[in-house]
Image (tube, helix red, strand yellow):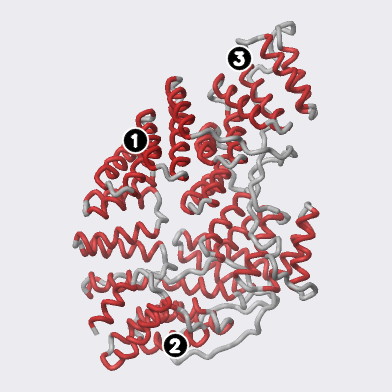
Amino acid sequence: MYRTIQLLLILVIPVVALFIGCAGEPGDREFRNGVRELEQGRHVRAMALLEKSISRRPASDQNAAAHSYIGVAAWRLGRVQRAMEAFEESRRLDPGLFEPTYNLAVLYLEAGDTVRAVPLFEEAARMAPQDPRPLEFLGHIHLQAGQIPAARRAFFGALARAPQSARVLTSMALVDRATGDSGKAVFYLMQALERNADYAPALYNLAVIYRDDLKDEDQARATFKRYLEVEPDEVRRIEAAATLRQMSGELPVAKAAPAPVEEPVAVAAPAVPVAAAETAPVARRSAEELMKLAREEAKKRNTQQAVTMCLEAAEMAEQARNVRQQEQALRLAVELGIDQARAQLALGRFLSARGDSASAIRAFKQATVLDAQMVAAHAALADEALKTGEYDAALVAMRQVVQLEPDRADTWWALASLYDERLGVPARAADSYREFVKRFPGDPRVVRAQSRINELVPPARVEPPPQPVVAAPGTPAAAPLPRVVVTPPSGERRLSIRRPVVRNTQAAVQAYNRGTLYQQREDWVNAIFFYTRALENDDTFVTAYFNLAAAYWAKGDHELAKDAYRLAIEFQPDSPAARFNLALLHRELRERDAAVAQLNALLETTPDHAQAHYVLGLLHSEAPVDVEKAREHYRKFLELAPNDPSAGIVREWLRAQ
C-alpha cells in the first residue's frame, strides 16, 4: 500500500566525456562494459567490471562515476553496506555529483537513519535546483515527524520545481489532512486529478477523505470505484474492493483490526520504483565511536558529516538517558562545526531543557548569526527570551520568524500578545491582531483577536471586519438537493444568479477552483465572478455559496454576504460553519439578536460547538439582564475547550462575576 515512501535509485549518471578517449586506455573498455551490464540487469558482472576498471586506472576522472554505478549494482543485489561505501567514495572523489548524494540519502532513509538522510537530501536539493525529488523526500520525512510547517515548505519547493506534478499536489493534500483541513486537502487532490485523471494515489486519498472526514459515502463509493479502474497493483485493488463492499453492506466491517486501507495514501517519491531485494538495517555504531569518527571527519575537513555524527551520538545518548554523554556530543558538534547553525541550535535546546536559559539564548543567537534563514533558531530564541523576560530579543526573533515563515499562526498570536500584554504598545498590538485575523480566518482565536482590536482602537478608527472562516475547496454532493427558494426579509437584496438549465458539475468545480485561487490572492472581484459562475453551473454547490459569502464580506458587501450564507444554510441546514460565520457577521454589524438566533440554531444541531458558546457568552455579557446566560455559555465553553487561548480570560470574567 502507499503508506511508505518508495525508495528509488538513479540509474543514469551524466558523465562528461563518458565514451571519449583512446580506445586502448586501460580500464576504459571495462568501464563501458560494466555500465552496459548494469543497464541490462546483470549486477554481479557489472560490479566486477567496474571494480576492474578502477584498479586499472586508479587516477581516472571517471572513477567517481564508476563508484556510483557500483553503489547502484550493490544496492540492487541487497548489499547495502557495500552500496553505502561506494556512494561515499564517489562523493569523496567528486563532491559535485548529484546521483551518489541522492542515492546515499535514500539508503540512509531506508535504514531508518533520518539524521543522516536529511542533510544529504538538502545537499542534493541544492545540487539539482530543478529536481523536485530531494524536496519530496524531505517533505515526507518532516510530515512523518509531525513537523508540518517544514513539510509544507519542502512540498511547496518541490511544486515550484514541478508545477504539473500530480504526485507533489497529492503530497500537499496529505499535509493539509494532517492538520485537520480536509477541505483544503480535497482542493489539492482535485488539482492533482486535473493534471492526471488516472493518478491512483490521489483517487485513493480522495475516497478516504470523503468516507472518513466528510462522511459523504456516495462520493466515497464513486471515487473508490474509479480508483479500482486505474490502480495497477492487484493487492491494493483487492483491499479497496473489500472496503467498497463493506461500505455497501455486502461484507461485515472487521472489528478485530482496522481495514488495511484505513490510512491515507502516502505518495511515492519521484522516479520509477526499483525492484530491489529487502535490505537489513545498517548496524549502528555506539555514541563513543561516532564521536571518534566525527573527529576524524573534521580532520578531513568534512565538517558537515562530523556534525551529523555528533548529533546522532547525542540522540543515542538521549535515548539511553545519558545526559553527560549527550552534552559531550553536542559540545563536540559545536567545537567541530563552528560554522554550523544546527549544532548551536541543538545545544541551545539541550541547555533550555536543563533550565540554563542564559546559555541557551547565547546558543540560539549564535545559530541565527550563522544562518539568518533558520526559522527554527529564531523561533527557539523567541520562546526562550519570552520565558526569561527579554522582551526586546523575543520581539526581534518573532518578527524574523513571521517574515521567513508567514503561515505560523502561533507566532503571529504570540507577537500580538507580546505587544498587547508585555510591551504595552496598543497600536502595534492591534495591527498584529488584524494580521492574525487576515491570515488565519479559521482559527478559533479570531474572535478574541477581533475583540481585542475593538478594545485597543478608539471607535472612530475601528478597522474593517475580520474575514470569515473560508471553507477549503471541495466538491458538490453526489446527489444534488432540490432548489429551495426563500423569500428574504423586506428590503434585503438577493444574489443575482441564473439557474442552470442543466447542471454541469464538472464546469462548476473548475470555476470554483479558479475562484479559490483568486481568493488566496485576495482578488475578491475575480473570486466573486468565478464562484458565481460555479453556482450558475450548479446552484446546489453549497461550498461555493459559503466562499462567495466570505468574498463578499471581505469586499465589504455585507448584505450579499449574509444572503449567500443564508443560501448555504438552506441547502445544508446543519452546516455549523455557515451559521457560525453568519452569526459573526451579524455581530460585527451590531445585529445582536440575529447573531444570537443563528448561534442558538447552530447549537441545536451541534451542541458541543465550543466557539458558539464562547461568542454567545460575549453577546450575553454585553447585556446586564443576560449575565446568567453568559455564565452558562462560558462554563460550557470551558468544559468543551479548557485549553483554548481564550479560556484564561473567560475564567477571569467568571471569577469577577
For the view shown, which residue lies furthest in the left direction?
A: 424
Q: Which image quarter holds the C terminus?
A: bottom left
Is residue 582 shown left or right of residue 197? left
Foreground of the two, 623 or 471: 623
Q: Amino acid at mark 3?
A: Asp
Residue 464 falls left or right of residue 55: left
Label 3 – label 2 distance at C-alpha: 77 Å
Circle 2: residue type: Asn
- Quarter of the image holding residue 361? top left
Residue 186 percent location from the top left of the image: 60, 63
Q: Earlier in the sequence, mark 3 or mark 2?
A: 3
Tell me the kind of residue under disc 1. Leu
Task: Give neighbour class at mark 3: few <14, some 14-19, many 20+ (Cα, 10 Å).
Answer: some
Number of the label disc, if any, that sits on residue 600: 2
> Which residue is pictured at 38% across the width and 37% down the height?
330
Name the element at disc 2: helix
**Residue at the spot of label 1:** 370
Residue at 34% over, 72% down? 646
Could you tell me if residue 308 is visible in this image? yes
